[in-house]
Amino acid sequence: MARALGRYEGPLLDAIHLFKYHQNVAVGEELGRMMALAAYDSLSIGAYSLIVPVPLHPKRLRERGFNQSLILARQVAKRHAIPLDFQTLRRRVHTEAQVRLAGKERTTNVRGAFAVKDRSRIESEKILLIDDVYTTGSTAMECSRVLMRNGAREVAVLTLAKTSG
């Protein structure tokens, strides 16, 4: 299951760009609070036992200076008093940025890019995976696949925005 706060257009798109590409962390924190407070069809945030942000590769983290998914996830975890784990799911391969790729290329790009560091931390957990934008779902599906293979009971995805395509 994947849900989003809104569509990747208009004011939400502008806010995400301010946050992600212009390093406006305060905007990101507010977007995370909005994610945490919203109601979603068939998804109750409080039903999950662990919040996990989509990780960045260390090289991309150094370039950007922050992980946007972690900033969003902190707000959701704080509001719902759900543990946050940003160390167990790792991006082990530095991949090309998904924004530059088309559908099938995105799937190929992230295949094998993620790994779980310590499966005991996610075994039997109901995980809410947090990311900023859902386009084709390739990143979310690959992260979910890796989490489930390593013992997670369930994985749902929550993003700020979903593209129209």
Image: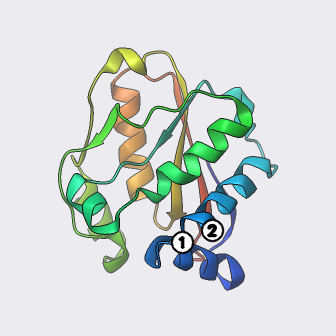
Q: Can residue 159 be seen at all in this image of the molecule?
A: yes
Q: Is residue 1 visible?
A: no
Circle 2 residues within 10 Å: few <14, some 14–19, many ≥20: some
Q: Is residue 129 left or right of residue 12?
A: left
- Toward the left, the furthest residue is 93
The relative height of residue 131 versus residue 42 in the rendered view (above or below) is below
Instruction: State the residue position of label 1.
Output: 24
Count of labels in the image: 2
Observer-nearest of 47 and 59: 59
Residue 145: assigned label: none
Q: Residues within 10 Å of mark 1 (few under 14, many from 20)?
A: some
Amino acid type of disc 2?
Val
Q: Determine whether label 1 and label 2 are within 8 Å by CB.
A: yes
Q: Quadrant of residue 79?
A: top right
Residue nearer the viewer, 24 or 134: 24
The disc at residue 27 is 2
Residue drawn where x is 79% and y is 49% of the image: 37
Which residue does the image show at 39% across and 57% down from the upper left?
138
Q: CA distance from mark 1 to mark 2?
A: 6 Å
Q: Quadrant of the N terminus?
A: top right
Q: Position of residue 78 (x, y in %)?
A: 66, 37
Residue 153 location, x and y as percent? 51, 21
Tag 2's secondary structure?
helix
The local secondary structure at tag 1 comes to loop
Residue 124: x percent and y percent?
49, 15
In the displayed structure, does residue 152 sit left or right of residue 8? left
Depth check: give the residue in front, 142 or 131: 131
Kind of residue indicated by mark 1: Asn
Q: Is residue 142 above or below residue 127?
A: below
Residue 17 lies, in percent from the top left, at 53, 78
Q: Residue at x 27, y 68 (%)?
A: 63
